Amino acid sequence: MAAARSAGDMLLSLRPIVSGRERDSTAMTVKAYADHNPFLFFAGVFGAVVVAKRRLRRSHGLGARCPSVVTALAAIPPVVVKALLLLMWLSIAWFFVFEAYYSVYRCAVSARYHDETILIARSVITLLEEHNVPYWMDYATLLAVIRGQSINEWDHDTDISIVFPDDGPAALIAAINAAGMYAVWDDRDAIQIMPYEGANPLNSPHMDIWFWREEKLADGSRVVSTAYDDVAYRKRAWDDIFPLKAVAWKAWPGHDIYIPADAHGVSQKEFGAWPGSYMTPVVYKGDCFHNWFQRRWLY
C-alpha cells in the first residue's frame, strides 16, 4: 500500500505546479437548437401568469370561454402576483448575468476547481500505473488530449476508462481511499473519485473511472462494452482501444498518458453528432447552467 500513499502525497505536493487555466484559442461553437438560457423560460412563465391575472380584470368574455383558467387565476392572491412580478424581473436580470457567464466567461469553473480536477487526475493515473492497471483517457478528456489541450475551462471532471477487473472494483476503491482520496461506486458502472470523504461530486472536483467489460461476439470478434446507456459508442471494437498509445498531455508536461489505439475514431463515434467537427470545443448552455447552479465558479 506504500504505492497508494505516494499517490496521495502527490495530490498535495503538485498543487503549486498547476497555475491558471488554459483558454483554448479555438473559437467556441454554440449548439443552435434545443439549447437556451433557462432564465428566459422562467421569466416567460412568471410574466405570463402576471399578465393573465391583470387581463382577467378587464376581460368580460374570458370566463365563458375558459372557466377553469379564470377560476384558477381568480384564486391567486395579490401578494402572490406581486411575488411573481418580482421573480419575473429577477429572472430577466439573471438572464443577462447567465448570458455573460456563457459568452464572456465561457462557463468556466473557478481556477482552484480546474487545478484540483487536474491534480486528482494525475494522482489517480499515478496510482493506476503503480498498480499496473491499464487505462485510457476517455470522453471529453480524450478530446482534450487529442486536441493538444489540458482540459476545457468549463469541464467539471475528467474521465478515464479501464477494463473491469476480474476481482471487481473493491480493491481499486480501497487503494484510492488509502491514497487519501475518496472513491465511491456509481450505478453508471463507474467509480467517482473526490478529493476527500463527504465531497459532493455535483460541486466538487472529481474524476470518473469508467469500467468496460470484455466480450466475445458470435462472429469471434472481441469488444469492450459498458452498461452505461447515456453514451453513443457503448460497444467498442477491441482493436479500436488496444494496443493503447502513450502520448503527451498538456496538463502533465513530461509525463505520457494513454489513449485508445484509434483515439480519433473513438471520439468521432462518440461525439460526431456535435456541431461542426468533434475536434472543435463545444459548450452547451444546459451544461453551463449546471456549472452556474452548482457554484463551481465559486469553488
Image (spheres, grey):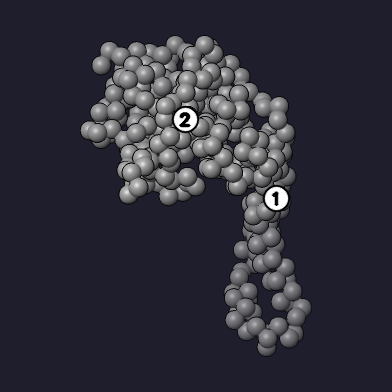
- Disc 2, SS: loop
- The picture places residue 223, in percent across and down from the top left corner, at 38, 41
- The picture places residue 287, in percent across and down from the top left corner, at 58, 43
Numbered disc in front, either 2 or 1: 2
Mark toward the start of the polypeptide (2 vs 1):
1
Q: Residue at x 61, y 41 (%)?
A: 288
Q: Residue at x 70, y 36 (%)?
A: 28
Q: Quadrant of the N terminus?
A: top left
Instruction: Work out which residue is located at the far front of the displayed protein and give it.
Output: 219
| Residue 198 makes an appearance in the image | no
Answer left or right for 163 relative to 202.
left
Answer left or right for 297 relative to 217.
right
Identify which residue, 109 or 39, lies in the foreground.
Answer: 109
Mark 2, residue position: 260
Amino acid on which disc 2 is placed: Pro
Q: Residue at x 54, y 13 (%)?
A: 253
**Number of numbered markers:** 2
Answer left or right for 163 relative to 293.
left
Mark 1, residue position: 32
On screen, residue 40 above or below 132: below
Crowdedness near tag 2: few (<14), some (14–19) or many (≥20) residues, C-alpha within 10 Å: many
3D distance between C-alphas at marks 2 and 1 = 31 Å
Amino acid on which disc 1 is placed: Ala
- The picture places residue 272, in percent across and down from the top left corner, at 59, 44
Crowdedness near tag 1: few (<14), some (14–19) or many (≥20) residues, C-alpha within 10 Å: few
- The picture places residue 132, in percent across and down from the top left corner, at 32, 20
Identify which residue, 255 or 60, lies in the foreground.
Answer: 255
Q: Residue at x 64, y 54 (%)?
A: 34
Instruction: Work out which residue is located at the far left of the displayed protein and give it.
Output: 167
Identify which residue, 237 or 208, lies in the foreground.
Answer: 237
